[in-house]
Image (tube, grey):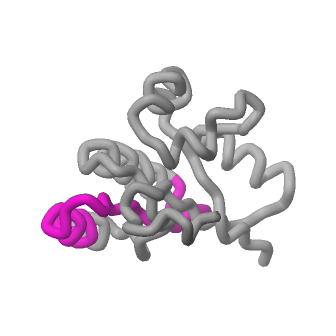
Amino acid sequence: MIIDFHCHIFSPEIILNREKYLKLDPVFQSMYSYSQAKMVTVEELVLNMDKQNIEKSIIHNLHWESSQICRQTNDYIIQSVKNYRDRLEGFGAIPLDSPQDAIREIEYCAEHGLKGIGELRIPPHFLKNEQVLK
């Protein structure tokens, strides 16, 4: 069995409004501001899995600072896993700016069948000493 353990998918909403989301989130901006950085929907991922003979993929959310965007993108991953139960497993995201929101989102993801949280990236402004990143 061939498993792709680290894939990212995006809802059509995020793909169509990429510029909006680039302005809303510094981590997303750092990863997807380059116009050639490919973004795919779940349907495109599954088509590519079929072409490459990949039987299962583990889809990961990004780290989003906003609790609202975390929920929105977690919902897309949850629905994607439900639609492709035999092909996908999912990991959600949590906001790092609010421990209470993070706990709520972990519980929400677990209740809806996601297998874990990932990925986590700490934005530079969360660090007291930004020299660590250089």
What's the residue at 64%, 39% (across, down)? 40
Q: Is residue 64 left or right of residue 31?
A: left
* Figure label count: 0
Whether residue 90 is visible to the viewer of this picture, yes or no, is no
Q: Judge whether residue 32 is colored magenta.
A: no
Q: In the image, what residue occupies the spot 57% across and 47% down?
A: 9
Give coordinates of residue 48: x percent, y percent.
Answer: 77, 47
Can you give x and y, in whole percent of width and height, for residue 5 in the image? 67, 71
Q: In this view, does 90 lie above or below 16?
A: below
- The residue most toward the left is 100
Residue at (71, 33) in percent of width and height:
34
Q: Does residue 89 appear in the picture of this structure?
A: yes
| Quarter of the image that includes the N terminus | bottom right
Describe residue 51's horizontal placement relative to residue 115 as left or right.
Answer: right
| 88 in the magenta segment | yes
Residue at 25% x, 44% y is: 68
> In the rendered image of this protein, does residue 45 appear above or below residue 12?
below
Question: The magenta stretch spans which residues?
Answer: 84-107
Instruction: Relative to 31, say whether 122 is above or below.
Output: below
Along the viewing direction, whichever of 50 and 94 lies nearer the viewer: 94
Where residue 16 appears, as percent x and y from the top left, is 53, 21
Q: Name the residue nearer the viewer: 26 or 61.
A: 26
Q: Position of residue 123 (x, y in %)?
A: 45, 57
Q: Quadrant of residue 55?
A: bottom right
